[in-house]
Image: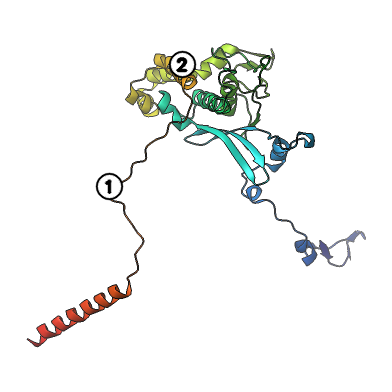
C-alpha cells in the first residue's frame, strides 16, 4: 500500500501539520490479493469451524469423522449424518421433517417437537443401515433426562458423531439442540452438555427435565393454543388453522407425538413416494424441421399465395 501525502504545513501556533493522506492500492497489492472461498463469499460456511469438525488425526488413516448436521429452514428441519473426503462431503443417511406426516404428524413441522422427532428418525435410520439398531435402542422412554449411549460388552462400540450447526445461533432453547436430543435418545453417541436445553437454570446449574419433556411433546404449543383460544379467538383461528382442519385439540398433542415416536422406532426406513406423471407431457422445446418438412411447408405457402392471387383476379 502506497501512501501519498501533501506537503507539511506550519499552523498558526508554529506546529507542523500534515496535509490530506490518500491510501492508494497499488498493482503489487492486487497481484497478491487472494480471493476467499466461494461459500465464504456467499456467507454460507464458517471454514474455521468446519476445519475443526472434519480434520482427522493422521494415525487414524482413512477413518471417517462423522458429523450430525442439523439445518432448519422456514418450512423444514434437515438432519444428516455426513463425513468429509477430498472430493467433498458424503451423506450416510438423512431425515426430514416433511417425512413426519407418514408417522402421524402433518402440521407444525418446524417446531421444537418436530425437530426432536426428526433427530430421532435420523438416528434410528442410521443405526438400521449400519446394523446397530437392535444393539443400541437408545432411550426408549422420553423423560427429558440427559442420556448418553453406553457401549455394550463384547460388541461393537456405539456410533459416534459430532454436532454441526452451521451458522445457527447456539442460544438456550434453540431447535438444533432438539434434534441433538432426539439423535442421542435414538442411540447415537454425540458429545454434548445440558446447558442449552430449555429448563436449564444458570443459578442452580441444573436441568429441569420436566420442562424439556414438555417441549419434546409440544406442551408449550398446547399451552399457547389454550391461551390464544380464550383471549383472541380470531388469531387462534389464523395461527392454528392446520390443527383445526385436522381436528386436533391441545389435549391430544402429547399423545400424537408419543405415537409418532413409537412409529419411528418400529420402522424408520424411508418411504418411497410415487411421482404423479401427467397423462400428456408438455414439451416446450421446438423440434427443428427436416429437409422434407421444410420443402412441404414451402409448397403449402406457394399454394396459399397462388390461391390468393387467383381469387383477386376473379
Extreme residue in the front direction: 154
Residue density around tag 1, few if under 14, some if 14–19, many if 20 or more, within 10 Å: few
> Looking at the picture, how far across and down is residue 195, in whole percent?
66, 20
- List the residue tagged with mark 2: 258
Q: CA distance from mark 2 to mark 1?
A: 41 Å
Where is residue 307, by image quadrant?
bottom left
Taking 311 as reference, is 28 left or right?
right
- List the residue tagged with mark 1: 279
Judge whether 170 appears above or below 141 on screen: below
> Looking at the picture, how far across and down is residue 263, in whole percent?
45, 20
Quadrant housing the N terminus: bottom right
Quadrant housing the C terminus: bottom left
Q: Tell me if residue 79 can be seen.
A: no
> Looking at the picture, how far across and down is residue 33, in whole percent?
75, 58
Extreme residue in the bottom direction: 313
Extreme residue in the left direction: 314
Q: Secondary structure at mark 1?
A: loop
**Who is closer to the viewer here, 28 or 20?**
28
> Looking at the picture, how far across and down is residue 60, in whole percent?
76, 34
Identified at 37% across, 29% down, the residue is 238
**Who is closer to the viewer here, 227 or 306?**
306
Q: Secondary structure at mark 2?
A: helix
Q: Tell me if residue 305 can be seen.
A: yes
Amino acid at each position: 500500500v502506497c501512501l501519498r501525502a501533501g506537503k507539511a504545513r506550519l499552523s498558526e501556533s508554529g506546529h507542523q501539520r500534515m496535509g490530506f493522506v490518500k491510501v492508494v492500492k497499488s498493482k503489487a497489492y492486487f497481484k497478491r490479493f487472494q480471493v476467499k472461498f466461494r461459500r465464504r463469499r456467499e456467507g454460507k460456511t464458517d471454514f474455521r469451524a468446519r476445519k475443526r469438525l472434519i480434520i482427522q488425526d493422521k494415525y487414524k488413516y482413512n477413518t471417517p469423522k462423522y458429523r450430525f448436521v442439523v439445518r432448519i429452514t422456514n418450512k423444514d428441519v434437515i438432519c444428516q449424518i455426513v463425513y468429509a473426503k477430498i472430493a467433498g462431503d458424503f451423506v450416510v443417511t438423512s431425515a426430514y421433517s416433511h417425512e413426519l406426516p407418514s408417522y402421524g404428524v402433518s402440521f407444525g413441522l418446524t417446531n421444537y417437537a418436530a425437530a426432536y422427532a426428526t433427530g430421532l428418525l435420523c438416528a434410528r435410520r442410521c443405526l438400521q443401515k449400519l446394523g446397530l439398531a437392535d444393539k443400541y435402542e437408545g432411550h426408549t422412554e422420553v423423560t427429558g433426562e440427559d442420556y448418553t449411549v453406553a457401549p455394550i460388552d463384547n460388541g461393537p462400540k456405539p456410533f459416534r458423531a459430532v454436532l454441526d450447526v452451521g451458522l445457527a445461533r447456539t442460544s438456550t432453547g434453540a431447535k438444533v439442540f432438539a434434534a441433538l436430543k432426539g439423535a442421542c435418545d435414538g442411540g447415537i453417541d454425540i458429545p454434548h452438555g445440558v446447558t442449552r436445553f430449555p429448563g436449564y437454570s444458570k443459578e442452580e446449574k441444573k436441568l429441569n427435565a420436566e420442562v424439556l419433556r414438555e417441549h419434546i411433546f409440544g406442551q408449550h404449543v398446547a399451552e399457547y393454543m389454550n391461551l390464544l383460544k380464550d383471549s383472541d379467538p380470531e388469531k387462534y383461528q389464523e395461527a392454528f388453522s392446520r390443527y383445526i382442519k385436522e381436528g386436533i385439540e391441545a389435549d391430544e398433542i402429547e399423545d400424537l407425538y408419543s405415537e409418532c415416536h413409537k412409529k419411528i422406532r418400529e420402522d424408520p426406513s424411508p418411504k418411497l413416494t410415487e411421482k404423479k406423471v401427467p397423462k400428456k407431457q408438455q414439451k416446450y422445446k421446438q423440434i427443428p424441421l427436416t429437409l422434407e418438412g421444410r420443402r412441404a411447408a414451402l409448397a403449402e405457402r406457394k399454394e396459399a399465395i397462388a390461391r390468393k392471387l387467383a381469387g383477386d383476379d376473379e
